[in-house]
Image (spheres, rainbow, N blue to C red):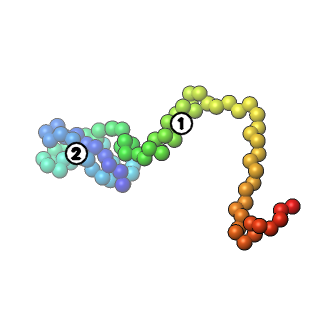
Amino acid sequence: MATYEYSCNRCGSFDVQLPIGTAPAEQGCPQCSNTARRVYSSPATAFTSPAVAGLRGQEEKSRENPAVVTRVPPKAAARRPVHPAVARLPRP
């Protein structure tokens, strides 16, 4: 469900929750039954977590100034978790 905003000339703005893509251009006002027009507004992204906001910021920065790779990064050593029962066994 998505929240769509409508504006009535008499009563002001109000929100309607409808399935995505089914919002008509005009909706009846719930208070006065007058025809209200749909208002296009920005999505409610102000309540995102700080982690998601940080990732979006990094993604926007990479659009303008992408990081350039000059060489292949070194291969990281494969680390296997050591089970306590075999931790003291000799390694080859």
Q: Position of residue 66 (x, y in %)?
A: 62, 30
Mark 1 neighbour density, 10 Å: few (under 14) some (14–19) many (20 or more): few
Q: Of discs 2 and 1, which sits in the foreground?
A: 1
Q: Which mark is residue 86?
A: none
Observer able to see residue 26: no
Q: Is 58 or 73 nearer to us in this picture?
A: 73
Q: Position of residue 64 (x, y in %)?
A: 56, 27
Observer able to see residue 1: yes
Q: Is 6 or 48 nearer to us in this picture?
A: 48
Q: Position of residue 40 (x, y in %)?
A: 33, 38
Seen at 30% across and 52% down, the residue is 17
Seen at 70% across and 69% down, the residue is 84
Residue at mark 2 to residue at mark 1: CA–CA distance? 35 Å
Residue receiving disc 1:
58
Residue type beneath disc 1: Gln
Seen at 75% across and 69% down, the residue is 86
Location of the C terminus by quadrant is: bottom right
**Residue found farthest to the bottom:** 85
Mark 2 neighbour density, 10 Å: few (under 14) some (14–19) many (20 or more): some
29 relative to 68 in the view: left or right: left
SS at badge 2: strand
Residue type beneath disc 2: Phe
Q: Earlier in the sequence, mark 2 or mark 1?
A: 2
SS at badge 1: helix
Q: Position of residue 72 (x, y in %)?
A: 76, 38
Which image quadrant for residue 5?
A: top left
Task: Establish if 47 lies above or below 90.
Answer: above
Residue receiving disc 2:
14
Q: Is 45 or 10 nearer to us in this picture?
A: 45
Task: Establish if 39 lies above or below 92.
Answer: above
